[in-house]
Image (cartoon, rainbow, N blue to C red):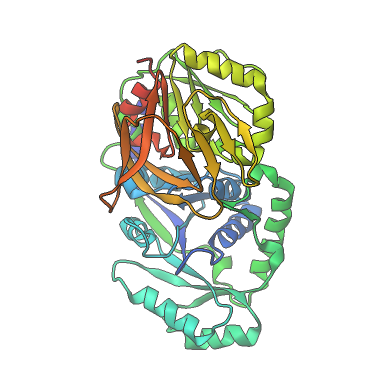
Amino acid sequence: MPSENIETSLHQRDQVTCPALFLTAPASNQGKTTITAALARHYSKLGKTVRVFKTGPDYLDPLILAQASGNPVEQLDIWMAGEAYCQERLFLAAKEADLILVEGAMGMFDGEPSSADLAACFGIPMAIVMDVKGMAQTAAAIANGLATFREDITIAGLIANRCGSERHAQLIRDALPETVPLLAALKRDEEVTLPERHLGLVQAEEVTQELEQRFDAAVDWLRQSDDKGLLSLPEPVVFSAPDHSYEASVVEPILSGKTIAVAKDIAFSFIYQANLDALERLGAKVCFFSPLHDSRLPQCDAVWLPGGYPELHAHKLAENTSIQTELSAFFETGKPILAECGGMLYCFESLTDLEQNTLPMLGILQGQGAMRGKRGCQGMQTADCPQGAIRAHAHHRSRSANTPEPVGYGRRQRHPAPGEPIYQVKGLTASYLHFFFPSNLTAIAAIFSER
């Protein structure tokens, strides 16, 4: 949509109402994604248009939630994207949706900003998802403590996950205050649990049919609860247009006439839709290729190698010498390449996978990458690139060695130690950091322009 039309669309009606619910929890691994996906599929099967958002930097959950809802899933993070950006995305979603669901990250008050901060900012009521295995009245006490910890949030109720029996549910129900109703008591059921691996959930495209079966089972799972609070739409929330449209304020189309080839397959899939949209708003044409399967690089002016799971496909990446030759030749021209996390590992001389097999990679960046089991690095950082500061995050369980001198480092949110190094060699920019392009479009345009 042209920016002038977006501006008009935003302000034809400065406010719109839409039922909305924010799924949060006291900690990670309580079942938020499973329940959010089940709700999205339940209402979608009723013919409702459901828009789902995921807080924080996350690539895998949104793909699963998009499949469950039948609509794209966007990230919301006030620090990473800015309040006006988040406000605009919610407002535009509310104009077309019958229901908005937001899945939080980590615990309810964890992070700066936290899930509670985001919910409070936009007035979205929060449902607390809690794994209640091994407790009863204590679950009610924890839920009440979360509900009363801050005065600027609204609590819709508690979703008691993994209940052992109706008696178990009744003990929790009786102990809850009237202000925190029991929305659902969900029995323990492994058939609805989503598949996982070392960095989180398995990618949706790897298990599409399995997910469909689990979504259907999860809808039945919701409907079996004696508490029906989740099976009726939540109260409408008023969403307001921002004072000025983010999309209408996009800088000049600096990348007009440029084609950017993006690596996209099951080895490289950590791609924000917002980043692709940002490239197109800057005037670029985006095309895709597969380092796993393709022998030729598309005709292009720049390449983006996003993160993913190259370590799980290192043998096949090493065997595809045709695309390696193409990418190496492209690098030698000095044209722009952005390599993030898994994309950077692919650029190194070699990669040692989880089974300690060492495979040759592109070799366009000095150094070696190696997986290291459960130890790793994660967190929000500002990437201080020579082209400008870009909001980003790190999430990896690998290490690198014998790398060149960095041109900059990530700046951590709350710690003075340097963050992830940023390398630039010829036209290549590489880092463990995953960039959020909309946070600095001018810097992104410069990275994808020839130096």
Residue 444 occupies quadrant: top left
Determine if residue 89 is in view: yes
The answer to whether residue 411 is above or below residue 220 is above
Residue 169 occupies quadrant: bottom right
Residue at 29% across, 50% down: 413
- Front residue of 11/360: it is 360
Query: Residue 311: image x %, image y %?
Result: 60, 40
Query: Residue 67: image x %, image y %?
Result: 62, 46
- Front residue of 344/291: it is 344
Does residue 284 appear left or right of residue 150 in this picture?
A: right
The answer to whether residue 257 is above or below residue 189 is above
**Residue projecting furthest to the front:** 402
Query: Residue 439: image x %, image y %?
Result: 33, 37
Residue at 36% across, 51% down: 239
Residue at 33% across, 32% down: 7
**How many numbered marks are there?**
0
- Front residue of 148/349: it is 349
The answer to whether residue 163 is above or below residue 342 is below
The image quadrant where one finds the C terminus is top left
Determine if residue 241 is in view: no
The image quadrant where one finds the N terminus is top left
Query: Residue 33: image x %, image y %?
Result: 56, 58
